[in-house]
Amino acid sequence: MEIYKSLKSPASQEFEKLLNSQLSKINIEEGKIIEGKINKITEKFVFLFVEGLKSEPVLDINELKSMGLADKIKLGEKISVLLEKIEDKNGEVLVSASKAQKIKGWDKLVEAFEKNEPIMGKITSKCKGGAIVEHIDTGSLMFLPGSQISDKPLKDISHLMNEPQKFAVIKLDKIRGNCCVSRKEIISSFKKEDKAKIIEKYKIGDIIKGAEVKGYSNFGCFFNVNGELDVLVHLQEISYSRVNHPDEVFNIGEKHDLKVISVDMEKLQVGCSVKQLSPDPFEHIENYELNKVYKVKVVKLMDFGAFCELEPGLTTLLHSSELSWTKKNVSPKKMLKVGDEIDCVITEIDKEKRRVAISHKLTLENPFETFEKKFPVDTIVDGEVVNKNEYSLFVKIDNLDIDAFLHCNDLTYLNNGEEELTKYKKGDKIKVKVLEIKSLEQKIRVGFKQTKNDPFDWFKGKKMNQAITVKIISTDNKGLIVRPEGCEMDFTIKKSQIAINSADARPSRFTGGERIDCAIADLDLNKRKVNLSIKLLEEIEKKEALEKYGAEGSGKNLPFSSLSQDLKKKDKEKK
């Protein structure tokens, strides 16, 4: 130890010089990638020698094999590792070969992105929205969006799986460490030169024969020309008539002639038109008249209607509601087929909006008008129940293609309508009376009870305050259920209308079956409404007694407990 006692000695100065020169060659820093040489191999671990470290870093053999470095597990081979810690809590050096590989791979991806160079990779698996690509050089994983797999739609990409191929780096997120690649861009770059040569062949005004419908978008329709070029027909260039979506006019796979209307060599795009192959029919739309029958050709069927041609280039919509008078929500695909020629009436012509509306049902006889002529209101006819729901019946009359509506309230005068409805089923014969016909609204209402005598007619000739005799059918807490003699209907006398004295206004006074007199308190024959009252009859009789008898004693024999007092009060008023 004496040699280090004084640094001024030649030996100390020489040692200091050697030590400093050795350390200056080795730059050891955490977070950096360093090279280590394998100097020992066991069953599970590989030991590395790194100059400048006081101990040997250790790597797991399985980690190296999973990285595809099994062929490098040999003495003397060099392996790049990330120095995570020079000394952990156990005093050991902590390194990672996989993290070093990822960092090196990221650096290569950044370099390829900045230089706009392709990288080699292979698709290893599918995922939501696309696929996962592995960078062949470094093993880094990248995302391949579904839209970037190819320049044309692919239903199956199994033939591309695990095949080494080029990809373009299109997006890098250094913060999240995400990378997006594109196979489509590589394919397109190869085709770009060839595509330019193809587009040079087309000039504005050229006619393209038999282009095939390839796909739709909200702004137009794409056609494939001879398998070498895709062209766009904008929505406004499809037809002179209004078109909301290309599928209203075209079907995938159909072939149509096109006219070239634009050529863009910079964007390598060709624009075409279908409607410009024929003259604008709206220039002579005055030749067509409203409410006149014309022959139209069905060119396209949709769920909501059929597109028809009045003439080539003049397409109009025949809505499903204009196909039939009686069938609701009818499917055009069941009634018509493409190529059919049918009669239609023009119902609207709007030159400014370039719209023509047509109707097929107007060329047919309106069954509702026929029904009205044959069976006017108040006619009684035979019908058959063809359908029912929870509140009504639908009745077919005279084999006409019309279902008349019969509400449950029009089934009976006596019982509850909904209960009466349960007695009917499909196929039942029924005699009904026509109550209402609305041809424009396509509605016919009929009734069954109207074919019978109305029991309420018993009250015809009766008037308010008139006394009638009724039979008590039953009682409850709310009052009395009574039936006038000679009438088939039951009515309610409310509890408050049973007697003048509240003590006597008890439904329990009656057991049922008694015959009593009451008065008509309210009567409306038009609304079929009547109110009956025992209390009112008592009041009427009491008033008559007061007017008839002038002496107190003469009224004591009458069945009115308060009559004496009422007579005294009357005498006082006279004085």
Image (tube, grey):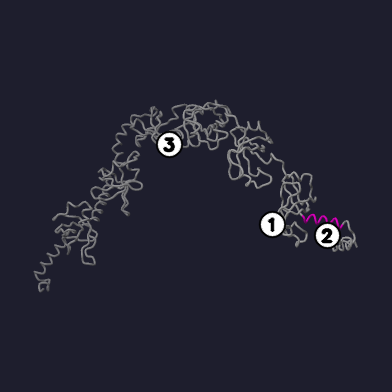
Choose mark 3 or mark 1, whichever is in front.
1
| Cα–Cα span, label 3 and label 1 | 75 Å
Q: Is residue 258 visible?
A: no
Secondary structure state at the residue bearing disc 2: loop
Circles 3, 1 touching at the beta carbon (< 8 Å): no
The magenta stretch spans which residues? 534-546
Q: In this rendering, does residue 482 appear at all?
A: yes
Q: Is residue 543 magenta?
A: yes
Q: Secondary structure at mark 3?
A: strand
User: Which quadrant does the C terminus fall into?
Assistant: bottom right
Instruction: Classify mark 1: residues with Cα within 10 Å, few (<14), some (14-19) or many (20+).
Output: few
Q: Nearer the viewer, residue 559 or 65?
A: 559
The location of residue 43, given as percent across then percent down, is 17, 58
Type of the residue with mark 2 = Pro
Q: Which mark is residue 220?
A: 3
- Work out whether 416 lies above or below 379: below
Numbered badge on residue 238: none
The residue to which callout 2 is attached is 559
Q: Quadrant of the N terminus?
A: bottom left
Left or right for 82, reference 179: left
170 displayed left or right of 537: left
Res. 503 image quadrant: bottom right
Please state which of residues 355 and 409 is positioned toward the viewer in this rendering.
409
Q: Where does label 1 land, which residue?
A: 476
Q: CA distance from mark 2 to mark 3?
A: 96 Å
Question: In the image, 391: left or right of 119?
Answer: right
Residue type at numbered disc 3: Gly
Q: Nearer the viewer, mark 2 or mark 3?
A: 2
